Amino acid sequence: MLAKRIIPCLDVKDGRTVKGVNFVDLRDAGDPVELAYAYSEQGADELVFLDITATHEERKTTIDLVSAVARQVNIPFTIGGGINEIRDAEILLNAGADKISINSAAVRNPNLIDQMAAAFGAQFVVVAIDTRHIAGQNFVHLSGGRIQTELQTEKWVLEAQERGAGEILLTSMDHDGTKNGFDNILLKKINDSIRIPLIASGGAGAQQHFVDVFQETNVDAALAASVFHYGEILIPELKATLRHNGIIVR
């Protein structure tokens, strides 16, 4: 069995790490490069950086941030936000990112997944999906959760996989920032239906939530933000708890 991964997520706005609840009410959480270095030292397995307003504001993810992080950390990191074409991804990978994450652009132009997988390899392509439960169904949302689509989450996950996505990063908007636990029902349903790694996101508030998500859904990785940023959960202690519960971690 592959070791489960713990991934801090750094949502970046105007060069600072921010965190909100249900994608709104953002507050400052520190310098992203300093946080990245701290997480690398603590034993995080990977990092994810999402420029959360890049798509909404129609600008590119900052190259300077990627270069600075690449100089500071020795663990893989993914960068997302404002990536709309092959050239955008190429620049970020050349600047030092290990993977790129596409979300809104992939929904608007699904062929982008095929193109990026062909250009860089599936292992470099993470398709991020923001989902919300509405009237008994799960729908994909775009532009940092601002725009609801008619696209059903489960169908989009399968299409992204078939088009060449190497991983799915699934964020439950209903659970995001609430600290009430991951959306394990949806995560299990999706993880049972795909053959590529699934990263759980949205809702972590206690170490037990990580135990629950791995035991109940068998996802490959669990991602969180505020509980790490504000020191509510320390990664070494979290990994010790997971090991104590029979979950293999690095």
Image (cartoon, rainbow, N blue to C red):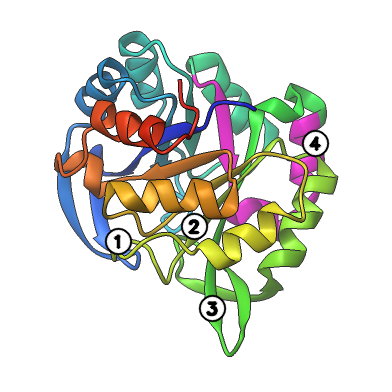
Labelled pair 4, 1 in contact (Cβ < 8 Å): no
Give the quadrant of the N terminus. top right
Q: Is residue 60 visible?
A: yes
As helix, strand or loop, the secondary structure at mark 4 comes to helix
Q: CA distance from mark 2 to mark 4?
A: 24 Å
Q: CA distance from mark 2 to mark 3?
A: 12 Å
The residue tagged 3 is 133
Residue drawn at x 27%, y 55% as measured from the top left: 205
Q: Nearer the viewer, residue 81 or 203?
A: 203
Above or below, 2 relative to 156: above
Give the mark count.
Answer: 4
As helix, strand or loop, the secondary structure at mark 3 comes to strand
Q: Is residue 142 visible?
A: no
Labelled pair 2, 3 in contact (Cβ < 8 Å): no
The residue tagged 4 is 115
* Quarter of the figure with residue 198: top right
Side of 43 relative to 120 (left or right):
left
Residue range corresponding to the magenta coloring: 97-117
The residue tagged 1 is 177
Whole-percent x and y of residue 208? 33, 51
Q: Amino acid at mark 4?
A: Gln
The residue tagged 2 is 171
- Magenta-span inclusion, residue 229: no
Residue drawn at x 52%, y 73% as measured from the top left: 132
Q: CA distance from mark 4 to mark 1?
A: 33 Å
As helix, strand or loop, the secondary structure at mark 2 comes to strand
Above or below, 167 relative to 39: below
Q: Amino acid at mark 2?
A: Thr
Q: Which is more N-terminal, label 4 or label 2?
A: 4
